[in-house]
Amino acid sequence: MRAIFKNFIPYWKVIVVIVVLLIMQAYCDLSLPQYTQAIIDVGIQNRGVEHIVPAKMTADEYESAQIFMNDSEKKTWESLFRKEGKYYERKVNDEEALEEADTELLTPLVLTYQLGHMSEKNFRSTVKENLKKNPKTAMMADKIDDMTVQAIEDMMRIHVKTFRAEDENGRVKTYFDMRPVLQTMISKGMMDDSQIGKSRKQADEMIESAGGRTLKSMGCAYAVKCDREAGVDVDKIQTSYLWACGRRMLLMALLMLCAAGCVAFLASRVGADVGRDLRSRLFRRVMLFSNAEMDQFSTSSLITRATNDIQQVQLVSTLLLRMLIYAPVMGIWGIIKVAGTGAHMSWVIVLGVCVIVSVVLLLMSLALPKFRIMQKLVDALNGVSREILTGLQVIRAFGREEKEEERFDKANTDLMKTQLFTNRVMTFMMPSMTLIMYSLVVLITWVAAHKIDAGNLQVGAMTAFITYSIMIVMSFMIITMMSILLPRAGIAAGRVDEVLSTQPTILEKEETLEVTQHSGRVEFRHVDFRYPGAERNVLTDIDFTAEPGQTTAIIGSTGSGKSTIVNLLPRFYDVSGGSVAVDGVDVRDMKLHSLRERIGLVPQKGVLFSGTIASNIRFGNRDATDEEVREAAEIAQATGFIEEKEDQFDSFISQGGSNVSGGQKQRLSIARALAKKPEVLIFDDSFSALDMKTDAKLRKVLAEKEKDTTKIIVAQRISTVLAADQIIVLDEGRIVGKGTHDELMVSCDVYRQIAESQLSQNELEGI
């Protein structure tokens, strides 16, 4: 995972902004359920009244409200109001003071409301219980259920005030105001202070079990009743409250939308920049690789790492910033909000989260090993595809189409089976999460319904709890899903980091030497070389000098080390022993760019790039004029086929030069090296693709036009090296002959055998 997170370091300022925006988004998101709860519990159920202290009340109600208050509470109650005519108006509107009053006066006001808003069933029950408490009236308690209200009033010698009002379901019922009865019972000694204290204690227990919210709703209902009786427009208060909540919800939704949009933009930008930087760094690092590093990483693997693997890192980088930071904030903050609803059902969320984590861990244990295998299978498929497409002509020539199709099908099928397995496993993720989430909603609703029925929970609190629960579960779903994507991206990031952390073996020294002489003299000083990891040398004690203006030819059997020698000169590899020098300076002491700028290399296999003929010839010298391009083509014997084309030097060359022949490709490669105007020209078996006539013309023109250039020719044909000023004969990595053609025919058996195998006796005698 470290390989992923270290890519964020350059963008830490943007990430800080993203975190701030995500916190703002989470705050807005988590505020919406609160407003929903407020609309239901306060705006609808409490008619928009937030506090239990009425805004205005009648004088009788003001006195009746103090029945259950102690001296301290009465003092607080009196401090809240001022008398205006026959009404008492609330003079304190500070939210903090009203909150304190809500807490202090909740119990007496709720008891007062219950006493003044009692149903007939509760009225009979209350009278019966009070009669049983007095031995003198206990016998009369059993007759209460059969008596009419008027009979009860006559028996108790009291008058009970009744009124019609809507219940919580909107049905109109008859209610009893028992406060006069209580006052009469207190005055007659039927109810003393201890019994009043007992009623208060029971109310306190109810408040503690319900969290105070349900009883506060009853207190607010009492405030609404008082306001209405005092002539306050309660409907206007309710409408104003609902509009205020609606405006806040709209504002929060707009802020959340803006924050989410900005986060999505910034996260996508950072992810894209991370992908861009990784591709750039990977490409620059690969460009520094010597042949040794290229042998370590296959071409198909490097292509996969530069495309598929970086794409995985880029995608997960965006999701990390967008989701993984947001999910913990939502989850933790949501749990805090849940605790504030007073629903007391946190165990439901814990159960849901445990089930989700268990399901995800099961799916991860099945899918994660396959993700590791998948990246290797992508490498294998790319390798097979590249090999087949590159060797398509050979495959057709040998009639191997079916076999190669079978090989491709096997690699493709292996990848398909692995992807199908992981996809099938992952398809269980969303249905499982959805099932768990909605099962959780059903469970919450079922548990909450019992609490609401018992009066311990409000509907708004249940709604908020369900919303918060879904948010918390969704947060854990995001975290667990990211925990599946992260390992796969971690594998991809590790593969990219493996390339980036591989140090090239061909490095410049901190202090390099400047070459003062620019003649192009090349010296191999007792050079030994072996490939990395090899047990024995490929070249041993190679010692010769290639002089400026001369042609040095290297010849030998296949595998004798000819191409390895020319790879040492531009430092595609470094020598294992001895040294290679240009103009007296060891190539390891020179700047790579300076060294390679002085060398024109024509590889054994002609390589062209997509573009035009002119752009390919200018590849080594962008500033070459049209005349210099034409001259290089003439020397390379390429003008013949170029001028036959309709667009001539502007003719299109497809990728790899697939629309020109092998000989034409090779001649354009030679022209490219010549246009560079190098001090040293290296032809690595470059004339093998040319016919004998073109070969002879090319060598003749080279001798005339490039008189001062050091020319090193690797060849297998004797005819190519006959006129060389110096011929180096290799056999199993050692120099077994050095001299001109005539000298070697006499002194070197290996050279003589090669010459006799290629030329007839008459041809040899005619030379």
Image (spheres, rainbow, N blue to C red):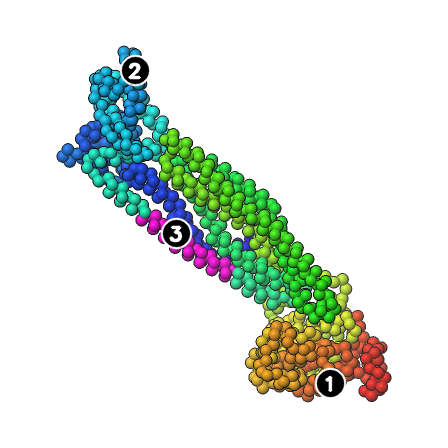
Residue at figure coordinates x 55%, y 57% from the top left: 312
Q: Which quadrant would residue 546 be assigned to in this image?
A: bottom right
The mark tally for this picture is 3
Q: CA distance from mark 1 to mark 2?
A: 136 Å
Residue placed under numbered mark 2 in the picture:
143
Tell me: 365 left or right of 441: right
Element under label 3?
Answer: helix
Element under label 2?
Answer: helix
Q: Amino acid at mark 3?
A: Met
Specify start and end residues of the magenta stretch as a single range: 247-274
Residue placed under numbered mark 3 in the picture:
256
Residue in the foreground of this view, choosing between 4 and 546? 4
Question: Compared to 51, does 753 lie above or below?
Answer: below
Q: CA distance from mark 3 to mark 2?
A: 64 Å
Q: Amino acid at mark 1?
A: Lys
Residue placed under numbered mark 1 in the picture:
693
Question: Compared to 392, does 337 lie above or below?
Answer: above
Residue at figure coordinates x 59%, y 74% from the top left: 610
